[in-house]
Image: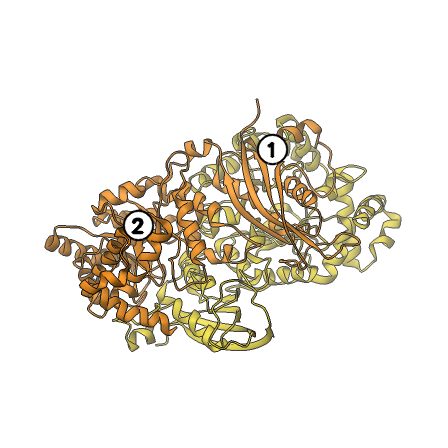
Chain colours: A orange, B yellow
Amino acid sequence: MEAKRVIATYSVETPFTLERAAASIAGEQSTGTFTAVPGETASLKDRHGARIERITPLEQVGQPSLPGAAVPRGHNGIYSRGEVAVSFPLHNFGPSIPNLMACVAGNLYELRELSGLRLLELELPDDFKARYPGPRHGIEGTRRLTGVYDRPIIGTIIKPSVGLGPAELESLVYELAVSGLDFIKDDELNADPPYFPLKDKVATVARAIERAADATGRKVMYAYNITGDIDALERNHELVVGAGGNCVMVSVNSVGLAGLAYLNTFSEVPIHGHRNQWGMLTRHGQLGMDFRAYQKLCRLAGADHLHVNGLGGKFYESDDSVVKSVQACMQPLFGGYKAMPVLSSGQWAGTAAVTYERTRTADVMHLAGGGILAHPDGPAAGVESLKQGWEAAMRGIPAEEYAKERVELRRAFDKFLREDRAQ
Amino acid sequence: MEAKRVIATYSVETPFTLERAAASIAGEQSTGTFTAVPGETASLKDRHGARIERITPLEQVGQPSLPGAAVPRGHNGIYSRGEVAVSFPLHNFGPSIPNLMACVAGNLYELRELSGLRLLELELPDDFKARYPGPRHGIEGTRRLTGVYDRPIIGTIIKPSVGLGPAELESLVYELAVSGLDFIKDDELNADPPYFPLKDKVATVARAIERAADATGRKVMYAYNITGDIDALERNHELVVGAGGNCVMVSVNSVGLAGLAYLNTFSEVPIHGHRNQWGMLTRHGQLGMDFRAYQKLCRLAGADHLHVNGLGGKFYESDDSVVKSVQACMQPLFGGYKAMPVLSSGQWAGTAAVTYERTRTADVMHLAGGGILAHPDGPAAGVESLKQGWEAAMRGIPAEEYAKERVELRRAFDKFLREDRAQ
């Protein structure tokens, strides 16, 4: 019986032929070493060897993207690019994210046969489904917990990111929680700081949220940043659920995919996955990893919410790339594993239109920090402006048209559009 | 009292001035967001803000290294490079590796004010020492456990990496363990595969090692690859120590620095830190991280041994870079935290000379896979050839001269030098 296989698709750049580069990848990551060794028999290679599934030549370039590539004798100065799909027998490593990564990434980025390597996509057999349950709450659970349907979850981030004391934080959270927001999150910079330990922060925030719930009849979802050492995660999670909390957040790259999967073994509430440090893995187009592969790993490991930047955001990423990220999160994985894409960074009411126009989905969280907190008429007006921005977008009405009759949206445009244009 | 601070040094490339780029880094990673928000008071900024410590201008280039940088109006097409040191108050995040990373790396790689960013170095206050004990065995413990002093620990890697069955593995490990080797490790591709689960592998390997110890009176150190999900690490570690094992190995980037630190809370044996996937984080010179910063984090998290590639190796990395990595591991950290650099990849007897000449230390592990297993006269001759290579190097005798009287070394040169030259 043919063994189940993982298929990894790479973008490759090489001074050699694409065939030779692909063979290096396949050899390095399965049975080979730099010289033939006893025991590497034909039948062992047959059972355990990686296999080149597909090579699609793309453009050629005159400069290597990464340093250190060897060049063949008489090299003509041309580096070939292409997509290479390689498959690995699952029984070499089993349905284990950590061991999968050692195989599909491993030492590959160091091969001198390559002047560029990027992991684009992973196709994983069902065995991963049996090992990793994925998002336990996902889009549906998040909607149920927030009571928000048919539009995005509107949220904000506690700002300033660091430095607020108990009284200031409690009053800010209360103000935000009664402002009509669906969701509030800690900043990724603020988890369990010595000046205001998580234990105290949870107590403070929970008090504000319960007070607000008493006033409004509705409990906001709050993502407490519980990022920390592995042995702190369970304790931190306990603090949150013990105080009636309904969401935890982790910096996925800080706790690792393994840490995320571990949190998912006991978390009772949705896990808000923050992808900070991701830029390091993805910003150069010929290195690292595409979000297509990364989001799949994050969903498998249990992220109920996953950050994707925002359209018209403040970061380097193009809108096209953000749209692709949202679409990647929407792709079914093992018939489910739905995570809610989180649009964030430089967001405000005016970015709703382009977001909906480009993604055609309302199954997202739309977070605005400054875009809500710095609204000229305060956070409640900021929240209202975002909801109005989405109403307009989903009804196909130009936002500036819709804003004529809606003061919150108009005032948001007056302030933030001017700031955008002044940049 | 002035708060304790973490100092992060970056290599920066920017279409703006270095001052503006540095301010973006400092603002993004402490109190700021894209627009001024209420509550970001002067006193809060003073207590919690990041501070630019130093800006050292370097060369200018005509092309951005990374895509997506914004350019200022009337940009002259010049991108400035420099070293920028930024300090962060420790009380913003505390002595926590996961939260440190969210601060010093975080969203920085995504800033559009930057066309290049690389974390070069981290200076950490003593508080980290109190939280993370670092390598519990280190160089001294590894020498004690192996009984090897005054020369490198000579080791090999089980090859073929994957596919050996119980009988083949037991006989190979026995052969290696009686061959005079100090150290054997699993390949990073081989941890707990379904075709040969770790439980069975540990039993098989331990049996071979005990048999060999009975024969030789000396027990080889074997690094069992226990990489896996977080909740498997303790179980896997138990399997190893329960079978009398004396070393465990993990793929650091698979379990994460957090996973490594977690393993270090209970591991009774040295932790062999394999850095596969590291190329993704470091191969582009204007992105990611320098090994200088990374090795410090790995040592803090508890790596007793840490891979650094090898001189004259098979990967893209230059010898200069490998030498710097060895030197970085030798730098004192909190007055100790000594990890043993592991030289590996394309190594054989002939690479001892250049390694010693360039690093002037014997406090390393020198691993040869093919260079031992594929020695024409078998593994014992391969091991002997490596020891001879180091003797020659440490006595200042040219290896090919020394080889005249030593058949193992001569035969190694005959085979592997020819293969090297044929490449």
Give the residue number, with chain letter if any, for mark 2.
A248
Q: Position of residue A287 (x, y in %)?
A: 56, 54
Name the quarter where the N terminus of chain A is drawn: top right
| Residue B260 seen from this side | no
Quick one: SS at disc 1? helix
In percent of the image, x 45 and y 37: which residue is there? B235
Instruction: Say which mark, if any, is on residue B205.
Output: 1
Chain at numbered mark 2: A
Callout in the foreground (2, 1) = 2
Residue B342 versus residue B158 in the image, above or below: below
Name the quarter where the C terminus of chain A is drawn: bottom left
Q: Position of residue A134 (x, y in %)?
A: 38, 39
The local crowd at label 1, few if under 14, some if 14 to 19, many if 20 or more residues have their Cα within 10 Å, is: many
Quick one: SS at disc 2? strand
Q: What is the C-alpha distance between the residues marked 2 and 1?
A: 42 Å
What type is the residue that disc 1 sits on?
Val
In percent of the image, x 83 and y 47: which residue is there? B418
- Residue B215 falls in which quadrant of the image? top right
Q: Are marks 2 and 1 on the same chain?
A: no
